[in-house]
């Protein structure tokens, strides 16, 4: 009985695979489809109108590319930022633009910070626990 079921399953699988040849030829995986790159025309090459351009020197840096370190510094610390009139009004109301080097000064030891007291320092310095030895009381 098992051999008969296996034989019927094999014949059904071969029949199903035999039916796939028609779909492959008609469109599913068809290799005779039109070429999408051949549809558009390539524009003709033109000579630039300015003949006084000098060819680049071999090994010279490209003028349109910026220095990667300058790009990184501009991304981290910002550069001149264009503001909208609404943003400029908000800045003027708040007291003007901040100092330009504020990001490099914010973490220095000479920066004045608010003293939050010993209780906050103790909470921050406490070791992490699983909460198994904690208790809660409600005042009466």
Image: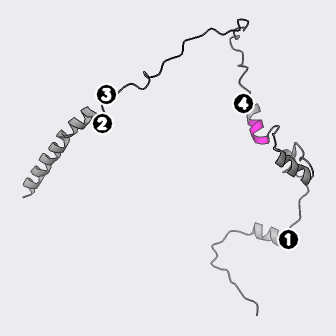
Residues shaded magenta:
72-77
In the picture, the quarter occupied by the N terminus is bottom left
In front: 10, or 112? 10
- Which circle marks residue 83 in the picture? none
Judging by the rendered image, the residue that carries numbered circle 1 is 118
Whether pointer 2 and pointer 1 mark residues with C-beta atoms closer than 8 Å, the reply is no
- Foreground disc of the pair 4, 2: 2
Q: Which mark is residue 28?
A: 2
Kindly identify which residue carries mark 3.
31
Q: Are marks 4 and 1 in contact (CB under 8 Å)?
A: no
Circle 4 residues within 10 Å: few <14, some 14–19, many ≥20: few
Q: Is residue 110 visible?
A: no
Residue marked by disc 4: 68
Q: Residues within 10 Å of mark 1 (few under 14, many from 20)?
A: few
Q: Which SS class for mark 1?
A: helix
Q: Count of labels shown?
A: 4
Give the alpha-carbon distance from disc 2 to disc 1, as whole Å: 73 Å
How far, Cα to Cα, is label 3 from label 4? 45 Å
Q: Residue at x 82, y 73 (%)?
A: 119
Q: Residue at x 66, y 10 (%)?
A: 48
């Amino acid at each position: 009985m098992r051999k008969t079921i296996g034989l019927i399953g094999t014949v059904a699988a071969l029949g199903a695979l035999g039916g796939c040849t028609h779909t492959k030829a008609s469109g599913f995986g068809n290799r005779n489809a039109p070429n999408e790159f051949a549809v558009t025309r390539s524009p003709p090459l033109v000579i630039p109108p300015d003949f006084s351009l000098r060819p680049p020197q071999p090994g010279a840096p490209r003028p349109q590319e910026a220095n990667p370190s300058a790009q990184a510094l501009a991304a981290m610390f910002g550069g001149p930022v264009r503001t909208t009139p609404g943003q400029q009004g908000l800045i003027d109301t708040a007291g003007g633009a901040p100092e330009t080097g504020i990001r490099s000064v914010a973490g220095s030891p000479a920066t004045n910070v608010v003293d939050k007291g010993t209780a906050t320092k103790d909470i921050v310095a406490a070791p992490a626990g699983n909460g198994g030895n904690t208790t809660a009381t409600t005042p009466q």
